[in-house]
Image (cartoon, helix red, strand yellow):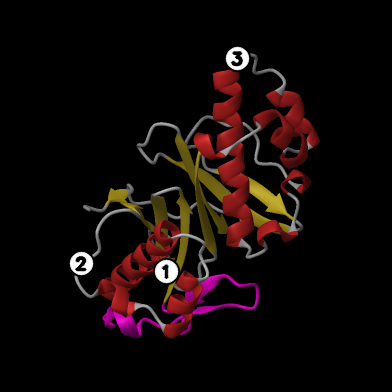
């Protein structure tokens, strides 16, 4: 059986423990300073400090010694490859997945409030057959819910393969299965498995994708970290 993947949800506006901001590397502090507002800077710091704490608990390193680096595509990873992880955020909500070494994974969380024009986005983000299925949904709430579910699945796939926006989401399909379904996807010849994650937050959707033909590794229920 494949090793399980741990999932964590946390609030980026929650107060950090004293001294936690000092865990960040010089590069992370420099990146934090490039955000336009103090609130966004603090959310980045909280996200990275929480990531470091959770990785440290699993590696035995001190949080400020966890060797986080960016790969050639800009995707954060552990320099020693001891674990795999991926972090996503939407507003003040963050979703983190931590899995075994060698697993290529991606997660995404989004809030419907952050999606300004579902109809316009659907025409450029959904494949032709997904657009045809999308047209069957008549009421606005159902259309927005299903678009958001597809959006996070596609973003999770692109993050898993480390390509981000280099690949147009309309190039591949993830379909309209029931929420929570573990299903295959294929992006430019790369096989993936993708599943929904229930963030337990009204108006939000989340998903995880892993590279490989399947099945999806066991997923621990998302743990909501205390503020």
Q: Nearer the viewer, residue 190 or 203?
A: 203
Q: Which residue is mark 2?
A: 17
Kindly identify the residue that appears in the image at 33 percent across and 48 percent down.
Answer: 222
Kindly identify the residue that appears in the image at 56 percent across and 53 percent down.
Answer: 214
Kindly identify the residue that appears in the image at 58 percent across and 60 percent down.
Answer: 160
Please, what secondary structure does the residue beneath circle 2 have?
A: loop
Q: Does 56 appear in magenta?
A: no
Q: Which residue is mark 1?
A: 100
Q: Which residue is mark 3?
A: 139
The residue segment tinted magenta is 60-82
> Does label 3 or label 1 sit earlier along the sequence?
1
Q: Indicate the position of residue 104 as horizontal and vertical percent values.
A: 54, 65
Please, what secondary structure does the residue beneath circle 3 have?
A: loop
Say whether residue 183 is left or right of residue 163.
left
Q: Indicate the position of residue 126 as horizontal and vertical percent values.
A: 73, 38
CA–CA distance in space, label 3 to label 2: 45 Å
Q: Indicate the position of residue 38 as horizontal and vertical percent values.
A: 41, 61
């Amino acid at each position: 059986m494949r090793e399980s993947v741990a999932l964590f949800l946390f609030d980026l506006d929650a107060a950090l423990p004293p001294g936690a901001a000092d865990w960040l590397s010089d590069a992370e502090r420099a990146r934090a300073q490039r955000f336009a507002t103090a609130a966004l800077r603090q959310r980045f710091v909280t996200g990275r400090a929480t990531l470091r704490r959770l990785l440290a608990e699993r590696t035995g390193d001190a949080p400020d010694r966890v060797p986080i680096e960016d790969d050639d595509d800009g995707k954060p990873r552990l320099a020693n490859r001891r674990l795999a992880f991926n972090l996503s955020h939407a507003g003040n909500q963050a979703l983190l997945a931590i899995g075994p070494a060698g697993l290529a994974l991606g997660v995404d969380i989004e809030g419907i409030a952050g999606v300004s024009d579902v109809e316009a986005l659907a025409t450029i983000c959904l494949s032709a057959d997904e657009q045809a299925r999308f047209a069957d949904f008549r009421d606005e709430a159902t259309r927005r819910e299903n678009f958001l579910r597809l959006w996070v699945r596609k973003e999770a796939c692109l993050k898993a393969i480390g390509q981000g926006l280099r690949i147009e989401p309309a190039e591949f399909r993830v379909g309209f299965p029931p929420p929570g379904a573990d299903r295959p996807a294929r992006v430019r010849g790369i096989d993936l498995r993708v599943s929904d994650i229930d963030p337990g937050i009204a108006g939000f959707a989340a998903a995880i994708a892993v590279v490989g033909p399947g099945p999806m590794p066991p997923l621990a229920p998302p743990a909501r970290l205390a503020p």
